[in-house]
Structure formats: structure tokens, C-alpha cells
Image (cartoon, rainbow, N blue to C red):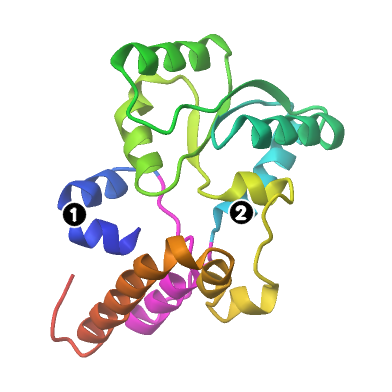
Amino acid sequence: MTIEAYDNPKFAEVVNGADLVCADGMPLAKAVKLLYGQKIDRVAGMDMFPDLIQAAHEEKLSIFLYGTTDVILQKIVEKINNEFPKAKVVGAVSPPFRTLSKEEEEGYIQQINDSDANMLFVALGCPKQEKWMAKHSKKINAVLLGVGGAFPVFVNDQKRAPEWMRKMSLEWFYRLIQDPKRLFKRYLYTNSKFLYLLCLQKLKLKKF
């Protein structure tokens, strides 16, 4: 996401315009420490999502799920109903994997608002989910939270990297092993460019 924002100024405006921006990746958290001497916590969507479901259970809040597939959504709803019964799931939508028509977008927004959800979890992947939230946030009467790939991990449909790999900033490598065909070119470009830009800024050759 950092490289996407660097390459695309309009997307950078989307990210910087959010009410809260967290460091999802450990490399980003370590980069802040390296550049500014400031320790920040990693706030990964995969950790945040179950924590917020627990909070919704304790506070008796209603939630809406937007993204992923119908199969994954059904598993999530079943798990929440069984393990977090006081967290009320008031809706779940798996939008088509294509550009939505204006009528479809308005229909989904109306469905979300009619549900009276307190929290809307969005899992469309970067940069699609950030753009979607920025576009519709003022129309939706709920707190919007982008959680990336948290949905399948929450129901154990997809394995997450061991904790030692997460601490060593190697979660990306674990994902690469799981899906090399899709991720190899992306990681080759984004990881290399991130390290290149980090070195430039550390050496004070360029400021971002």
C-alpha cells in the first residue's frame, strides 16, 4: 500500500484522508523506527478483526461484513454466532469481482444503512477497499474498517505465517510461498522499491 501510494498521488490522498491509518506491515513499523527513532506498534487487519469482534460481543454492537466470497462470509457469520453471540451480524455482502454500476453501489449502501450496523468491515484488498471506503464513507452511517485479508484467516480457510516470521518481517514471504504465481511480480517490485526508497531517505538523499 505504501508503494501504491508513492506511485499514485491520488491514492496517497485517499490513504492520508482516512480518519486513522495504521501500519499493517512490520517492515513499515521498523522503517519508522529506523528513520525517526519512534517505536510504533504494528496493527494488522488479521489481528484487529478478531479483537474488534470480541469488543462488539462485549459491547453488544452490530456489525456488517462487506467483501470476500459467500462461502467465507457464511463461515464468519456462523463463527461469530457461535463464539461471540452478543455481536450481532446484521448483514453480509459479497460484491461481484467487477466494477459495480451506480445502482448496485447505491443498493449496497442502502442495505448497509438499513441494517443500522455500528461497524462495517470491508475486505476488498488494496487499493480497492481504500478507494471504496473513501468514496462512500460520508454516505454510510457506520464506522468503516478496512481489514484486508482478515476474513479467510479468521475462519482458518487460509493459514497465517508463524509468529516468529511476523516478528522478523517475513509474513510477505510466507504469503509468497502460498501463492507464488500471483504475488511474485508484485513483491519483486514493491519490496525492492520500498527498500530503495528507505535507503534514500535514511541517507538523506531524498525526502518524502
Q: The C terminus is located in which quarter? A: bottom left
At x 58%, y 20%, the residue is: 117
Residue 8's label in the rendered image is 1
At x 67%, y 79%, the residue is: 164
Q: Specify the farthest residue to the right.
A: 82
Residue 166 % position (x, y): 60, 73
At x 40%, y 52%, the residue is: 21
In the image, 172 versus 197, the foreground residue is 172
- Sequence order check: which comes first, mark 1 or mark 2? 1
Up the image or down, 41 lies above or below 88; here it is below
Left or right? Give the position of 134 relative to 56.
left
Amino acid type assigned to the residue bearing label 2 in the image? Met
* Mark 1 → mark 2, Cα distance in angstroms: 26 Å
Residue 10 % position (x, y): 18, 46
- Judged from the image, the secondary structure of the residue bearing numbered disc 1 is loop
Left or right? Give the position of 79 relative to 101.
right
Left or right? Give the position of 165 relative to 190.
right
CB contact under 8 Å: marks 1 and 2 = no
